[in-house]
Image (cartoon, rainbow, N blue to C red):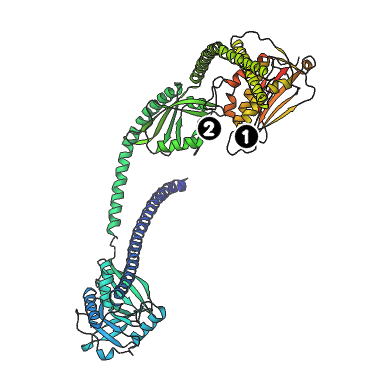
Amino acid sequence: MPVARVLRPAFARLRFLRSVWRRWFLWVLLAVLVLVLLVTVVWLAGRHEVEQTQNVLDRDTADAVSDLRVGLQRNAQTLRASLGYGVDREQWEARAADLLREHREWLRLEWRDAGLQLRGSVDTPYRRHAFEEARRGADQPDVQLACAAARKLGAPAYSPSHYLPFSQGTGFEVMELCLPVEGGGYLVASYSLRDTLIELVAPTLSRGQEVAFTEADGTRLVAIGAPRRVGTRVFTAQQIIDLPGATMMLRVDGWRAVPDLFPNMLTALVTAISIALVSVLVLLARDTRRRLRAERDLADALAFRKAMEDSVITGLRARDLQGHITYVNPAFCEMVGFGADELMSSDGEAPYWPTELAHEYQRRQAVRMAGAVPPREGFESVFMRKDGTRFPVLIFEAPLINAHGSQTGWMSAFIDISEQRRIEELSRASQERLQASARLATVGEMASLLSHELTQPLAAIASYASGSLNLLGADRSQQRSRDHDEVAMAVRRIAEQADRAGQVIRSVHDFVRRRDRTREAVAPHALVDAVLPLVRLQARKLGVRVELALEDRLPAVFCDRTLVEQVLLNLARNGMQAMDMPELTDRVLRLKVVRAGGVGRDGEGAAAVDARRWLEFSVADVGCGISAEVAERLFTPFFTTRPDGMGLGLSLCRTVVEQHGGVLMFEAQRPRGTIFRFTLPVT
């Protein structure tokens, strides 16, 4: 016990020291990490600065090489344009002197013949003569090398640089340019490498750079620029200048002071971080209380806003500036049938866009995201529920502005107008039916008026035709000629058609007045033969070939002959007009009568066929066919696809057939065309 009592304080002190050392170790570790981080930042900053400086120097070197090449090429073109054509010696020397005053990089211009013999020369006026005439003969090696390369290439060529000594141990590097000219001679220009750097390269250099020509092994030939200062760092970039006949290196050295970021930056950063940590700890406690209070207020506001948005029946949707959905309310989800997660996770096309309208909606969304302001009165669109059904919506959109006054997206409100559209459609259909009834009543009045007004002229035509026939018959005993027979036939046809027109008008009049017509048993071939002359007359005009197909021993049909003939004639005319297309060469109209195995309009089935049989009349063409849109309204009164049509033909035909107990229908013919069929009861 005494030993334990003595050791217990020692153990407690040891635990305390251990905890202190642990804390110190953590602080030291934190300090070391911060120090390493700062050193790394300083090193990366210095390295980035070095890389930036080197990149700038490389770019300047590339620009200098490009400018040098362009300048040398431009000088060669200037020499060729000014001195490369036939002139006498005096003119040549005058032009050469002008060129030397404009180009300080040239020391001398020479005109040599095909054997490299000197014919004329001019020295630069900006320095004393550097060349001795005795040494500028045809055997000068540098000129020979340059001209041999120029002769081989057929283009300007350069000689390797050579040192031109002066008196008192001075001199400079020179390079020869040889340019072939017309007549077999050469133009030789002597370049001073130092002046070339000054004139062609120095304007592109920045302050604190030195540029030099060097050999391929690094031997410096000539250099210009600012000398290196003490305490600066050297950055070097070089590129090869590959000239025809000669190769040199352009070297650019840049001087830049070594960045002195350590230790001042470290001290400033540590001090700033220390002050920042203390300030953050002081402000954190005060800010925590304000944040908790703001979070409570925000939670209450969000709960109130969510309850308000969930209670409205208008669909709400929010999108960001990229078009992605960021919010939808339950009313919108119920409207389209998709969950909020499905809508907000969709990327690109929205799942409630109809497939056939997705491309148009994407284009409209792109216009909206570009900043186009939607109309304040809203616009209509069509959405698709999850089950695939479409429904119309009325959309109102407005920019979504945040508390700082900047736009963060678009807010949209949606109203389902399916019920409104249904009521409007019912109202429109009722209005159309009323208008159609009014127009049919007008047509009935017109038919009655026409039947009354045309009866007398048609009766007169028939009387005149009968009188003409009587006169021709009385005269036939004396003059029996072929011409009289043809006239008699024509007048007889006039009388028949006038009588037929009267019957048609009376039938239409009775049809409009809904009077009971006297029906009779009529042979099918008699119905076809009655309309065939008129059909063939129009067929000849349109180039249509008429084909007939009637089964043998067909029974007679019980019908109103005049009205059924008009149905056949109307269907035949429609078929021929459908084939009136320039690209259609083989035009065939088929009239067919067969025994029908179907049913009548009243729906008699197979059991009723034995008691009541039917004949089926069909008119087939090879025209353009009937589209799905036209088929939906084909029998609607006053609907027509022809500019000169009234839209009553097929409607009246169906009414006539249905009054006889039959059915008028149509179907597509393969490979092209349409077949109209109608049934009539047999006697």
Residue 580: percent from left, percent from top: 59, 33
Q: Amino acid at mark 1?
A: Gly
Q: Quadrant of residue 69?
A: bottom left
Q: Quadrant of the C terminus?
A: top right
Q: What residue occupies the far bottom of the structure in this picture?
A: 134
Relative to residue 232, is residue 628 depicted above or below?
above
Residue 457: percent from left, percent from top: 56, 14
Foreground residue among 64 and 512: 512
Foreground residue among 203 and 237: 203
Secondary element at tag 1: loop
Q: Amino acid at mark 2?
A: Pro
Residue 311: percent from left, percent from top: 45, 21
Q: Write the residue at 35% across / 88% down.
A: 115
Left or right of 605 in this view: 567: left
Left or right of 411 in this view: 680: right
Relative to residue 120, is residue 540 depicted above or below?
above
Residue underneath mark 2:
354
The numbered disc on residue 543 is 1
Relative to residue 508, is residue 21 depicted above or below?
below
Q: Quadrant of residue 483?
A: top right
Label 2 – label 1 distance at C-alpha: 47 Å
